[in-house]
Amino acid sequence: MRCAIGCRLAGFSLAGLIALSPAPAALSQTAVAPSAIPQAPAARRPNIVLILVDDAALMDFGAFGGEARTPHIDQLARSGAMFTNYHTSPLCSPSRAMLLTGVDNHRAGVATIEEILPPSQKDKRGYGLKIEPGVLTIADRLKAEGYRTLMAGKWHLGHGEGALPNSHGFDRSLALDASGADNWAPKPYMPYYTEAPWFEDGKPATMPKRFYSSDLLVDRLRTYIDEKPAGAQPFFAYLAFQAVHIPVQAPKAVSDRYKGRFDAGWAAMRAARNARAKSLGLIPPDAPTTGMPQDARAWEALTPEERAVYARAMEVYAGMLESMDASIGRLMRHLEDRGELDNTLFVVTSDNGPEFSDPVHAPGMNIWMPLNGYAWRLDGLGEPGSLNFIGRDWALALAAPSRLYKFYTTEGGLRVPLILSGPGVKAGARIGAPVFVTDVTPTLVDLAGATGNPAGAAMDGRSLRPVLNGEAKTVRADHEPVGIEVSGNAALFRGSLKITRVMPPVGDGQWRLYDLAVDPGETLDLARDRPELLREMLKDYAAYEARVGVAKLPPGYTTQQQLMANALGRQKGSIAVMAGAAVALVLAGLGFLLLRRKARR
């Protein structure tokens, strides 16, 4: 008998328990709670909903120890499988390319993001920053198997004719063709963009003047789902939220639920998350952890006004997560009303770790923001017209128990949550095997019962079915390498071993070696003690670079400088118009003064 969502959420959620207790009991590695979603008959192909959160940290969901209330995501975690050793790429577009194709980002055509692409790489294969011909998305693959394919949310995988979702297997799509946008109105969030480019089915979309992004995306996806009667045809739906990407925005009433929750500051949050990571079994109880780095700002050194603004920024961040979760709940209820919830497989994950950028204090933003209807102040923070962000110090705290954050191939940039729940997934599973973003598409194709093998680039990932059903403890042998590279930041994994390189100005560009089984926080570099192992893994990485076609960066390259240069290049037209208008105003003013002087004579 089907259990209503209200029945499933009647008990305490993990988020609620965590909020009530500073040191929750460790979760079982094998079982959490009995399944509330009965398994669908094997002959009935499941619907699939792939939910991608933007810039969420490993511990942001309640089930993973987060502060925000995420009862619907937590329920999917309890009724399905939680992957606690899942790695993605450090940047959004490469991650999305790998997630949707099962192919390494360079082979897929999206080696990095256009905002930081140097001119010397633009003509290189894999750096076109759109999905390459012959690379199939999961929508392509499932559409060939008779699925309806639907999408709502951020795309950021290429522009123009032939690059948008309608050209990559999606029957219906509402897509944001940018790295982000305002959540309350169809407008850009940074000077790199002159507009918020929304497209529906490949054509410019007419957007409402006012909306909230999480609600809008779920509403549109529900409309697409309702275009066919329940059970008439299985569907695949890709729901790519703007939460919690900059600008961090949420309804005031939701943000207000977290008043005072973050008043102790970022060092206190990182310490609390480190402790919860151990009590929840995300890291070993004896694993070394670190606090805030020495160059972080001391919370106590901020003025009371600064502390109020930054604490409110995190209240809005939590509110944005809760609002997104509420929209997921509305989608689940809608599927339940259609009688399709029991036969829907859900995937929930993040594209990379938390965002550290501070756009507000970047050069020129004091001019750009008022011209585009933005302000940064405590009153109304996160509401319409507010360009809110959390910044580096909160990102360092959110990334606990890991090191650094988005953009970098440390665990803070790569290790994020992954949940699978629904038909074919055992309830209450906790899976600690190393798995990667390229494994998601082959897993979903497998669980969908796809039998065909359409022509296209071979996938790099592997199906997770063996670890999901308990047939195997790992997907890969410990000696099998998996490489990742984005704009010079790179890593290579072999079992629990990892080498990583962090580029300037945050890092020094040197390779370091860690054993994540005992040191998931990357606190002890083993490179000097195990030089032969480092050399072996560097050979593996060189082979990876050659196989996928990693292009060299120009001397002195940094992402920050390239972003500024590319943004100025994009804005040349508007800057010229603004300059021309300013000159015209000055000339008009001078002319007026000359006329007045002449009239007086």
Image (tube, rainbow, N blue to C red):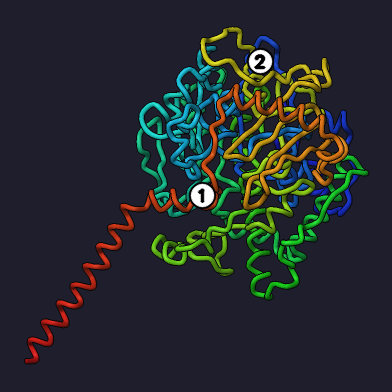
- Mark 1, secondary structure of its residue: loop
- Residue 58 at x, y = what percent? 73, 42
Q: Nearer the viewer, mark 2 or mark 1?
A: 2
- Residue 305 at x, y = what percent? 64, 74
Total tally of numbered discs in the picture: 2
The residue lying toward the viewer, choosing from 377 and 31, is 377
- The quadrant in which residue 299 appears is bottom right
Q: Quadrant of the C terminus?
A: bottom left
Question: From the viewer's perspective, is residue 512 above or below residue 453?
Answer: below
- The quadrant in which residue 593 appears is bottom left
Image-based side of 526 in relation to 548, left or right: right
Report which residue position mark 1 lands on.
212
- Residue 495 at x, y = what percent? 80, 27
Q: Residues within 10 Å of mark 1 (few under 14, many from 20)?
A: some
Report which residue position mark 2 lands on.
446
How far is disc 2 from disc 1 in space, using C-alphas?
Answer: 35 Å
Amino acid under disc 2: Asp
- The quadrant in which residue 500 appears is top right
Identify the residue at horizontal 65%, vertical 71% (top origin). Answer: 306
